[in-house]
Amino acid sequence: MIDPVLEARGWIGTPYVHQASVKGAGCDCLGLIRGIWRACHDGAEPEVVPRYTADWDEAQGEEVLKRAADRHLHRCDDDEWQPGQVLLFRMRRGAVAKHLGLLSVAGSAPKFIHAYSGHGVVESPLSGPWCRRVVARFAFQEG
């Protein structure tokens, strides 16, 4: 299987473009994870991705992104934090989960790779404020 961390690092510098998933040209947080998925699964998408808004149905309270992650990734909340795990974030208490990243470094100085509006794909420290927002962790399944 392709190393998800090495694949994600290859996306660093890709500009942020809502709903896109093209390495070097543009992606959002879901597009980054989709690109890593495709690299791990011989180019196949897990499912057709419907159009989505930046708020991820926040007003309706529907956990669209979380349900999709549950369908296609292996839940590993009870496992040790490992590089390559997909992190699902809830940006505000009581809001729907609407941000994704990939854990790139575990341990005492963790980092994650994500596509962030205004910044593109970057590797960031998984600082306390970010860590508190993680609501679920997933692993890619063998392709």
Image: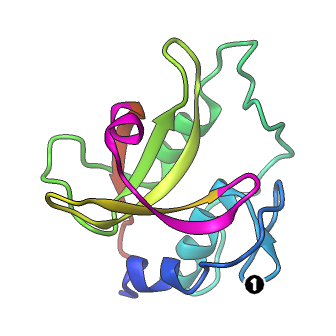
- Quadrant location of the N terminus in the rendered image: bottom left
Q: How many numbered dots are placed on residues in this image?
A: 1
Looking at the picture, how far across and down is residue 15, in whole percent?
A: 77, 71
Q: Which stretch is magenta?
A: 116-132
Residue in the image at 75% along x and 84% along y: 24
Looking at the picture, how far across and down is residue 88, in whole percent?
A: 46, 43
Q: Nearer the viewer, residue 102 or 47?
A: 102
Q: Amino acid at mark 1?
A: Gly
| Quarter of image, res 136 | top left
Looking at the picture, how far across and down is residue 109, in whole percent?
A: 22, 60
Where does label 1 land, which residue?
A: 24
- Scheme of image coloration: rainbow
Circle 1 crowding by C-alpha within 10 Å: few under 14, some 14–19, many from 20:
some
Q: Is residue 12 above or below residue 53?
A: below
Looking at the picture, how far across and down is residue 14, in whole percent?
A: 72, 76
Name the side, left or right, on which 100 lies relative to 20.
left
| Quarter of image, res 122 | bottom right
Asked if residue 119 lies in the magenta stretch, the reply is yes
Residue in the image at 38% along x and 37% along y: 134
Residue in the image at 63% along x and 74% along y: 35
Q: Nearer the viewer, residue 101 or 126?
A: 126
Residue in the image at 58% along x and 43% along y: 99
Q: Is residue 136 above or below residue 42?
A: above
- Quadrant location of the C terminus in the rendered image: bottom left
Q: Nearer the viewer, residue 41 or 35?
A: 35
Q: Is residue 5 above or below residue 134?
A: below
Judged from the image, the secondary structure of the residue bearing numbered disc 1 is: loop
Q: Is residue 18 above or below residue 3?
A: above
Asked if residue 44 lies in the magenta stretch, the reply is no
